[in-house]
Image: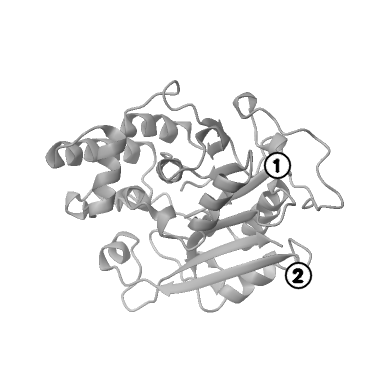
Amino acid sequence: MSPISSDVTFSPKYHLPLDHSLYSLSEDESAFFKEQTGIQGDAELKQHILNIQAEAYAVHPYPCIHLFSWTRLKIARLSPYPDLLKLGKERKGAIFLDIGCCFGNDLRKAIADGYPAQNVVASDLHKEFWDIGHKLFRDTPGTFPVSFIAGDAFSASHLDVVQPFTLAAPPSTPVPALSTLTSLNPLRGHVSAVHASSFFHLFSEDGQAHLARAMAGLLTPQPGSIIFGQHVGMPEKGTTAPQMTWKGMFCHSPESWRALWDGEIFEQGSVRVETELVKLENEDMRKALQVSPGSAFYLLTWSVTRL
């Protein structure tokens, strides 16, 4: 959820006042947060979430924090989500990485739905958000011992780019003990699933290609291994007009996103790339993101699966 390089299209001028009227939990979201936090009263839960929002917004005023996007159980609404849970159930030791994890809300949802917690890794630039996540969910590193690694995904010392591994040329390094990790590099070739949402669109075209190559190098060569997520896209590849929130955001189209992964990153035909582009109709989100009136805004849901 948060950018990890100076090469970001997000503008530091964005700082809308918090708007509590945007708070709204669906029935399943309310049930999830009550179960996770132990708070059963609606009013108490709302105040707890508002307090967390204010603390996080002071760390960095991202639109997703302003919009309560982190309460939406986004990962569970992505079409590849059942594939993630299947990997966790059927593949022994399948490592799941949530990159740009922010509070850890998505990975906690996956764990609640059955993904083995001991095989989950979280990473973000801002450790403060991970610490706030412990406050949000009222747990601790002791009671919720998921491995978290702070770092910049554009830094070679944290995540260096290597060619994707294949069954003919698998990684030569052993699977690391997740509790010992200080960077993502020891995971290269050993990760079964990577989730990256509200992430790629923060960077330039070159930055997005770099991140794609870096993530591809993490993936195990086993068929079914997957990278998936959701971010802003457009029907035609290009850069949006500059706005207060963005300096002009580079967006892939479904076609250019497929071409990047199937042919440029991975050998053509060795992966299945699925995409879905949906026009955003949520007016609260459009206002918070300060999208110009009359301009279209799209979200691209995608997955890259090894064959």
If the image is split into quadrants, where does the C terminus sit?
Answer: bottom right
In x, y percent, where is residue 107? Answer: 46, 43
SS state under label 1: loop
In x, y percent, where is residue 32? Answer: 30, 44
SS state under label 2: loop
Above or below, 302 against 173 in this view is below
In x, y percent, where is residue 8? Answer: 53, 53
Please state if 191 lies on the left or on the right of 289 as rendered: right
The number of callouts visible is 2
In x, y percent, where is residue 86? Answer: 55, 52
Q: Quadrant of residue 209?
A: bottom right
Q: Nearer the viewer, residue 163 or 97?
A: 97
Instruction: Please name the colour scheme applied to the rendered image.
Output: one colour
* Mark 2 neighbour density, 10 Å: few (under 14) some (14–19) many (20 or more): few
Q: Nearer the viewer, residue 242 or 100?
A: 100
Does residue 145 appear anywhere in the picture?
Answer: yes
- Residue 269: image tag: 2
| Amino acid identity at mark 2 | Gly
Does residue 4 appear anywhere in the picture?
Answer: no
How far apart are the alpha carbons under marks 2 and 1?
21 Å
Residue of label 1: 190
Please state if 108 lies on the left or on the right of 19 as rendered: right
Q: Nearer the viewer, residue 81 or 232?
A: 81
